Image (tube, rainbow, N blue to C red):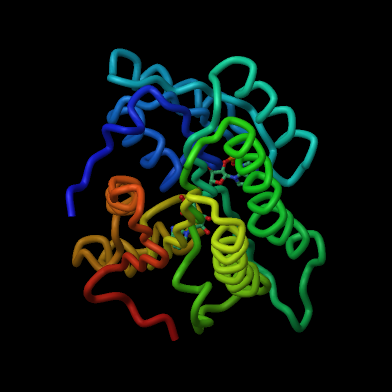
Amino acid sequence: MVLSMDRWIGKVAVVTGASSGIGAAIAEALVEKGLKVAALARRKDRLEALAKKLSGKKGKLYPVKTDVSKEEDILNAFKWIKENLGPVHILVNNAGVGGHTTLADGDTEIWKNIINVNVLGLSIATREAIRDMKANNVDGHIIHINSIAGHQVIDFPGLNVYPASKFAVTALAETLRLELLNSKSKIKITNLSPGPVDTEIIPDSFRNTEQFKGYIQDKMIIEPENIADATIYALSTPPHVQIQELTVRAVIEPTFK
Ligand code: NAP
């Protein structure tokens, strides 16, 4: 199989949650490959700093301040992209949140935010991208950044509705694949599930411990760039080949128990 990013050069990719971690690494990799990247997140200062860092590269990063828990924000972002950048070819649904609480005695606002961002925001962005792709006859590619927690519940305290939200993403990816298949669309959908990655989603209370630093030292936690490389791989496949599911994790992982 010949892998190539050539057909995406100069095209528009939308990356949600591009202000840190995995999303920032994916946005950077796409700019390096020559794409116009609409980078969506709430922290515009972070997006602007990334745009500045990437100036002079083959492609370009365009910060678009967006709260994906708000439908209106997503609609406005896609409108801006359509008017200023052109037809959407790639959507990476990466924005995602956790939050420490329980199911037995939990905080409803934390639950709602997780569902709004991880499930509804992803679904609304996907719908808008597909509408745009179909209107412009673009055989594009949607990538959901899921999690290993979307396939098996992990025994880690305080995860609350997070695994359920990621199980929903697994179902959403497959339901979309079937919808696209049944409508004979050539738009691709990839469900990409990382294991533990060193990002800000891991609470500082754990990230700053000697135990966590030991995991990093022993390469038991992978880097955002590893997920960016996997994203580029899925995008580089020939138009008729679809990477349906991709799990990317450390060879030896911590046991959370
Ligand atoms: P991160 O560094 O905390 O990044 C999360 C991103 O989501 C940020 O850019 C954040 O931007 C954005 N975001 C959160 N709420 C948002 C909202 N309401 N509107 C728009 N953007 C929002 O964490 P990460 O690890 O890179 O997470 C990226 C994805 O990977 C998530 O879907 C996560 O579930 C998944 N994942 C992570 C791991 C891991 O171990 N790190 C493992 C498996 C899966 P703003 O705060 O600026 O809005």
Q: Quadrant of residue 87?
A: top right
44 shown above or below 180: above
Q: Looking at the image, which residue is at 31% across and 68% down? A: 249
244 shown above or below 96: below
Q: Quadrant of residue 175?
A: bottom right
Q: Looking at the image, which residue is at 40% across and 20% down? A: 60
Query: Whole-percent x and y of residue 230?
Result: 30, 54
Q: Is residue 138 left or right of residue 251?
A: right
Find the residue positioned furthest to the front.
Answer: 184
Query: Whole-percent x and y of residue 38?
Result: 52, 28
Query: Whole-percent x and y of residue 122?
Result: 64, 52
Nearest to the observer: residue 11 or residue 119: 11
Q: Looking at the image, which residue is at 53% across and 82% down? A: 153
Query: Whole-percent x and y of residue 255?
Result: 36, 82
Q: Is residue 198 left or right of residue 136?
A: left
Nearest to the observer: residue 178 or residue 86: 178
**Residue 164 appearing in the image:** yes
Q: Quadrant of the C terminus?
A: bottom left
Q: Looking at the image, which residue is at 78% across and 60% down? A: 112
